[in-house]
Amino acid sequence: MTRVKMWPIWGICAGLFAGGLVSAQTLPVAVQMYTLRDYGSTEEQFRFAAESGFQNVETVGTHDLSAAEMNALLGETGLEVVSTHVDLNTLRTDLEGVIAFNEAVGNTNIVMPYLGEEDRPQDAAGWAELGAELSGIGSQLGAAGLQLAYHNHDFEMAEIDGKLIIDHLLDAADPEHLMWQADVAWIDRGGQDPAQLLRDHAGRVVSIHAKDNYPEGEGEAEGGFATVGSGRLEWDAVLPAAGEAGVRYYIVEHDSPVDYGTIADSLDFLGGRLSE
């Protein structure tokens, strides 16, 4: 099923990054549907995303829908899947199913989102081994026209043998087969500078999770996560660094929203900045 891409009105404007004009059409904003996991039914979640101004979504697997059901919902809401999160076990055991579903719904970006504590390597060699494994999976996805990326949390910001865990993993993988989805809020929580890491990995970052953190000790009801632009992250540094790094997708997420209006507010903030 072929889908026609519809861009937000600010998508026809240009953003100034790295000393040049970069069309916001190449830098779309999406919402990670995990944010809306407790907002009614799956259908209501997708409708709310569209009503909030989004035209792109990052899904969480299949949402227990068939490809035909997902396409019907996308057609109803006018949304497009630009990325999806697929857990490691599913990538290991049902890669053909992942490929078939995402080909059917028109998505080419697959992201491995999280490692449970039991799956986290304990040394540098283990992280390198995981990076090599993901690179192999990414090679198989690449043969089908799909791209694999790894999504970080705070624990990958720790050092082992004088090197960040995320670097042990990425350095062991072929850049063609494993990209990085950089979650800037978790980078900040891990004690690293998001803008600097984006610059350090220029060309390797396919997308960022655009989310923010309250100042330390604030926003406990929301898990410490804030609406994009209202927290402690320095977006005047993060957004230009993301542009320089070649980021293609800005994906709004809030792990523990109290007010679901946060996604529209985050979209407004990013849309204004990306169209300046």
Image: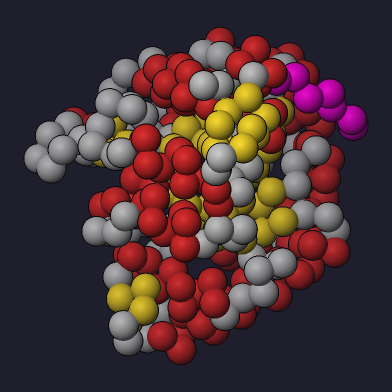
> Looking at the image, which residue is at 76% across and 70% down?
139
Asked whether residue 64 is in view, the answer is no
The image position of residue 43, as x and y in percent, is 61, 20
* Image mark count: 0
* Quadrant in the rendering for residue 104: top right
Asked whether residue 95 is in view, the answer is yes
Front-most of residues 20 and 274: 20
Q: Main secondary structure of the magenta part?
A: loop
Front-most of residues 176 and 198: 198
Q: Is residue 119 above or below residue 27?
A: below
* Quadrant in the rendering for residue 11: top right
Residue 4 falls inside the magenta stretch: yes
**On-image quarter of the N terminus:** top right
> Looking at the image, which residue is at 57% across and 64% down?
88
Q: Is residue 270 above or below residue 155?
A: above
Q: Is residue 34 above or below residue 180?
A: above
Q: How is the image coloured?
A: secondary structure
For the view shown, which residue lies furthest in the front direction? 19
The image position of residue 31, as x and y in percent, is 53, 30
Q: Tell me: 36 left or right of 23.
A: left
Task: Give the residues in magenta.
Answer: 1-8
> Looking at the image, which residue is at 47% across and 32% down?
252
The image position of residue 204, as x and y in percent, is 59, 60
> Looking at the image, which residue is at 85% across and 64% down?
143
For the view shown, which residue lies furthest in the left direction? 217
Q: Is residue 164 above or below residue 213?
A: below
Q: Tell me: 174 left or right of 226.
A: right
The image position of residue 37, as x and y in percent, is 46, 31
Front-most of residues 104 and 183: 183
Residue 159 falls inside the magenta stretch: no
